Image: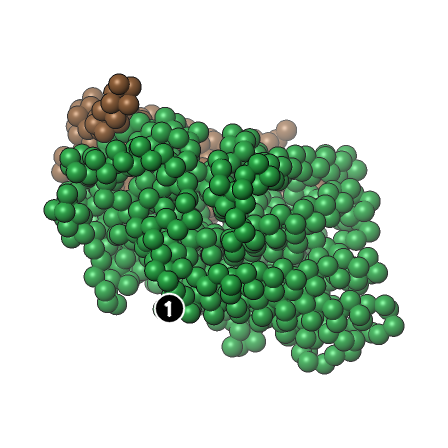
Chain colours: A brown, B green
Amino acid sequence: MTTVAYARRATEPTTEAAPRSASNGWWGMVLLVATEGTLFAVLLASYFYVRFKTSGGWPPDGIADPKLLRAFVMTVLLTASSFFMYAAESGIRRGRQRALVLGLGAAFLLGLAFLGLQIWETVVVARELTPRTDAYGSLFFTVTGAHSAHLVAGLLLMAWIQVRAWFGVYSQRRHLGVQMAAIYWYFVVAVQLAIFVSLYLTPRI
Amino acid sequence: MEAHVERLEKVWAEPAGIVSFLTSVDHKRIGIRYLFTAFAFFVAAGIEALVMRAQLARPREGLVSPETFDQLFSLHGTTMIFLFVTPMLSGFGNYLVPLMIGARDMAFPRLNALSYWIFLASGLFIYSSVPFGLAPNDGWFNYVPLSEKAFTPDKNIDFYALGLIFITISTTAGAANFIVTIFKLRAPGMSINRMPLFCWAVLATSFAVIFALPSLTVANTMLELERNWGFHFFQPAHGGDPLLWQHLFWIFGHPDVYIIFLPAIGIVSSVVPVFSRRSIVGYEWLALATVLTGIVGFGVWVHHMFATGLPQISMTFFSAASFMIVIPSGIQIFAWLATMLTGRPVLKTPFLYVLGFVVVFVIGGLTGVMFAAVPFDQQTTDSYFVVAHFHYVLFGGAVFPIFAGVHYWFPKMSGRMYHELAGQVSFWLVFVGFNLTFFPMHVSGLLGMPRRVYTYPSGLGWDAYNLLSTIGSGVLAAGILVIVLNVLWSLRRGAPALSDPWGGNTLEWSTSSPPPHFNFPVIPIVRSADPNWDLEDRRQDALRLERGELLLVDGHQTLATTVLEGEAEEELHMPSESIWPFVLALAFSVVFFGLLLHLYGVATLGCILVAGSIAGWHRPQRELQDQ
């Protein structure tokens, strides 16, 4: 009797109800973020390794502490964009197309503003410090450069999702693309927080 | 019933021909490609090894120049680790994981094709250095400062660094694919504690890949930036530190030892119960030991650096962690031995290779424990004792199981039996040849012979041991040649194999040999860890096929289940053939050759091609996108 009951349960996929556990795409994106997150962890670990191996001050003698204001504004902008992303994602989960389009649009524009400020920041810093100056400069630009590359990838992904959202591709039940873009974007934002704390705040300690 | 199977044939069939060759997403075809390609690299690395042994056969031999010798040992190590063992085991995983868990394909079939093409492209990238005499020449772990521009101005190191960054893409994508496949596509009823141990091993390995490989990527990227773009990471004169390379390399490198070793013990755990004719002893212990090995493997990297003058306290910590790794290894060995002793062993070729593995691996493990002791390590580091140790661990721990797997699954993959006598002859040649090659190295190492030397003077007491090693390498090569001939002969002339020639316990033996494109005509339902020994369940599968239940014949379909319990959840539509994975791999090749040759315009063009290929791949089809 138990066999029959089991077989019934197992052979009837619950396609009618929404899936109970995370989909393949969700897992794929989480694993991508996990491995890319490890990449940044290794980069920042290298930064601190070189810092603690350096005798004397940090940044090394003759190099000024990184300026806080612009980087702070950038971090705030990017953090704000993640809230808009969240609004878009939770909007489409309730079937609200307007929330999706507006949320994605705002998050994208804030991301774009961040990219503009990042370029400005790079130009300003490069007046005194370049990757060829020393290991400090190399690490500074490698970390921020790697983050910018991921940011651009995130922006491209968001643009793609945005265009599809305009055409009404996503619905309350079908919005895996939005979910995946959101996971990636939160990752980009989280890395910026780690960079701000590591590269901008800790040299002042 | 016939109608259902015909419909499945039509939906899943991939026509023959070159287009199908380039667009295939069938995990079985991709798996076999992995196996053949990796074996070709194994042959190349083996030839490199034989040349080295010929050079070292006697003192002051002049067969190859010191420069060539440097390239030989560097290429040999790099090939064995990155182009043979890892992809060979990916090949077994690709072929077997969907079959073992009762699925019809991998979770991301096109990503799977991409992994293979990138593996092939990066392997050819590294080997394209050989005709120009520019093969990597700084050892497989490529230490700075020797690998920096000032000391190795030619492109040898760029081939190495860019090639490894390239192949990392393949390995990482493959690992993510394995994890999602194992988490989501198991047959209904295959809860995680009923999963074949081979899948546990692939799962643990894949997580190790996800967290270990970024470190290799970072290290090689830094090296390239330093060599070609004027960055500084490793030069003390510019505020850097050469030990940073060693840390980054071994944070990857030691977990990589387990990335190599774990799938191999997965093969052992598959072969042991079938040839002992009983369920494996201590299934849960083996599964936990597998996971534990994968985790502890991340905490032992510094034992490769005991001789670099690190603080005593950190060496103590890593020494303790290195001793700890003995515990899960011991659990595994005793579980296998208990299974063999309480079963009724059948001494066929796969089982012989497993027995050989146990003997060789225990010896390698014992010398490994010796290295965990800091003072001993400092005495023997960079000597032939180390060479002996890691060949016992890697050849014993990975290659013996691979040969066991080759013979064990040959009937399933080819539909024919291999020649048993030839198989047993190959085992004895490999076993004797291996020990004759590598055991004397323990002695020559303790007598002070350093590794990586291209020759040595006579009168140091090393001559006889080196000659023995060289003779042994010939015997070993003869054994491998017998395996190759056996495979080639059996592919044409072997006796036809039934679906289950060994009385196997896992689901791949429940379908025909070779399996149909769709693997299973009906998705199996599972109620134990030895599903193919549950005759009643397999009879129920056949009945459901008659009744037309759970057939999933509308397109490339398979069943998604929950991660832990393996309860049926939804029918998935899988993507079918596509040319984009191949195109994307070509586009990546353009990027890497552009970077290698400093043709940055070409590299930029390659990046545009990569972006274009990704866009082409994902152009809306409303298939997989929004499940």
Question: Can residue A118 be seen?
Answer: no
B136 left or right, relative to B503: right
Quarter occupied by residue B490: bottom left
The residue at 73%/59% (across/down) is B439
Quarter of the image with the N terminus of chain A is top left
Question: Can residue A10 be seen?
Answer: yes
Quarter occupied by residue B542: top left
Q: Nearer the viewer, residue B471 or B585?
A: B471
Q: Which residue is mark 1?
A: B493
B337 left or right, relative to A96: right
B28 left or right, relative to B122: left
The chain carrying label 1 is: B
In the rendered image, the residue lying farthest to the front is B344
The residue at 70%/53% (across/down) is B389
User: How many C-alpha atoms fall within 10 Å of the one at disc 1: few (<14), some, or many (≥20)?
Assistant: some
Q: Nearer the viewer, residue A197 or B583?
A: B583
Q: Position of residue B6 (x, y in %)?
A: 15, 50
Query: Which amino acid is tagged 1?
Result: Arg
Q: Secondary structure at mark 1?
A: helix
